[in-house]
Amino acid sequence: MPIKESYESALRRVAESAPYYQLLQISLEEIDTGFARFRMPFRKELTQPDGIVHGGAIASLADTTVAFALMTLVQPGEKVATVEFKINFFSTVTSGEMIGEARAVYRGNRLVVADMEVKDENGKLIAKGMATCAILGTPKSKGGVKS
């Protein structure tokens, strides 16, 4: 089921206004229930001494993508926070754009899990991983009655 347009707009505002995402130039491309896609351009500022994008920058793209995919599964008043994150790196990035995609694979009462991939603009796999997030907060009740 697609997410509500108003919630999608709110998530886009969050993605556009977060200082860390601005620093990395991460942008939200697509979001739906249990799914998110973000892009991040190669920039010299993201490279390590050998001129390739630092793994931490790639992991930040992956973690951001997971968080937004999982935010579509929680209720108003709840948030998600990463508690475990595993990533494997398969190739380096020296130019172009990186695309992160995440899909939810499990939602329990207090934990949500997602699978993620980062590819280059040609579809070459750069990294793949999985993250577990905690659901924090209490859902806002409707009409004064807890649901």
Image (tube, rainbow, N blue to C red):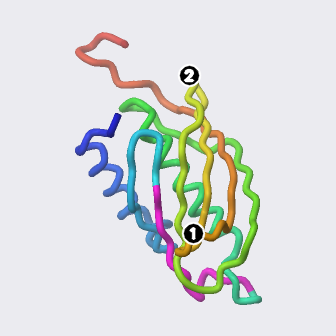
- Image location (x, y in percent) of residue 78: 44, 33
Q: Is residue 96 above or below residue 69?
A: below
Binning the other alpha carbons within 10 Å of mark 2 as few (below 14), some (14 to 19) or many (20 upward) gives few
Where residue 71 sits, quadrant-wise, is top left
Q: Identify the residue shown where x is 46% and y is 57%.
A: 37
- Image location (x, y in percent) of residue 135: 54, 32
In this view, the residue in front, 117 or 144, is 117
- Image location (x, y in percent) of residue 141: 32, 19
In this view, the residue in front, 37 or 63, is 37
- Image location (x, y in percent) of residue 96: 54, 82
SS under mark 1: loop
Q: Earlier in the sequence, mark 2 or mark 1?
A: 2
Q: Give, as a three-letter code, the residue at label 2.
A: Asn
Where residue 118 sits, quadrant-wise, is bottom right
Binning the other alpha carbons within 10 Å of mark 1 as few (below 14), some (14 to 19) or many (20 upward) gives few
SS under mark 2: loop
Q: Which residue is mark 2?
A: 109
Q: Which mark is residue 1?
A: none
Q: Which residue is mark 1?
A: 123
Instruction: Report the magenta residues as a range.
Output: 37-48
CB atoms at circles 2 and 1 under 8 Å apart?
Answer: no
Q: Number of marks in the image?
A: 2
Q: Identify the residue shown where x is 29% and y is 43%.
A: 7
| Residue 23 forms part of the magenta stretch | no
Where residue 117 sits, quadrant-wise, is bottom right
Cα distance between the residues tagged 2 and 1: 35 Å
Report the quarter where the C terminus lies.
top left
In the image, which is nearer the foreground, mark 2 or mark 1?
1
Q: Is residue 41 above or below residue 70?
A: below
Report the quarter where the N terminus lies.
top left
Residue 75 placement, left or right of 134:
left
Q: Identify the residue shown where x is 58% and y is 24%.
A: 108
